[in-house]
Image: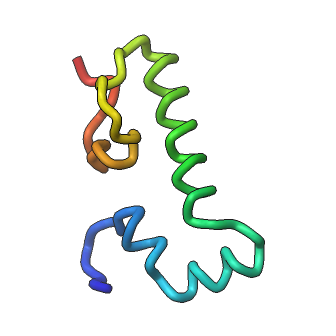
Amino acid sequence: MKYVDQELTIAEMLADPIVQTLMRYDGISASDVRHTIDQVLQNRLSSHRIPMRQSNASIHEWYQPGQRSDAA
């Protein structure tokens, strides 16, 4: 894992051994985290009335951190 002046990706965060230990302790799985992120992004996109990308990929697979979903 690299530590620089940027935020971790979701995949990097979920791969961190400390995060994995805490999630196990709390009974949370990586799929629970991804599902929650998908739900939040879907709610944000629908509340801004921006159509979601039509794809079989889930939102966390195409969403780019730092990219504003409300940019016109």
Quadrant of image for the N terminus: bottom left
User: Can you give x and y, in whole percent of width and height, for residue 11 in the image?
Assistant: 39, 67
Residue 57 falls in which quadrant of the image?
A: top left
| Left or right, 37 with reference to 29 | left
Residue 63 versus residue 42 in the image, above or below: below
| Left or right, 71 with reference to 33 | left
| Left or right, 66 with reference to 28 | left
| Left or right, 41 with reference to 55 | right
- The residue most toward the front is 56
Q: Looking at the image, which residue is at 26% across and 40% down?
A: 67
Quadrant of image for the C terminus: top left
64 vs 32, nearest the viewer: 32
Q: Looking at the image, which residue is at 52% across and 88% down?
A: 17
User: Can you give x and y, in whole percent of width and height, for residue 9 in the image?
Assistant: 35, 64
User: Can you give x and y, in whole percent of width and height, for residue 55 in the image?
Assistant: 30, 30
Residue 20 falls in which quadrant of the image?
A: bottom right
31 vs 20, nearest the viewer: 31
What scheme was used to colour the molecule? rainbow
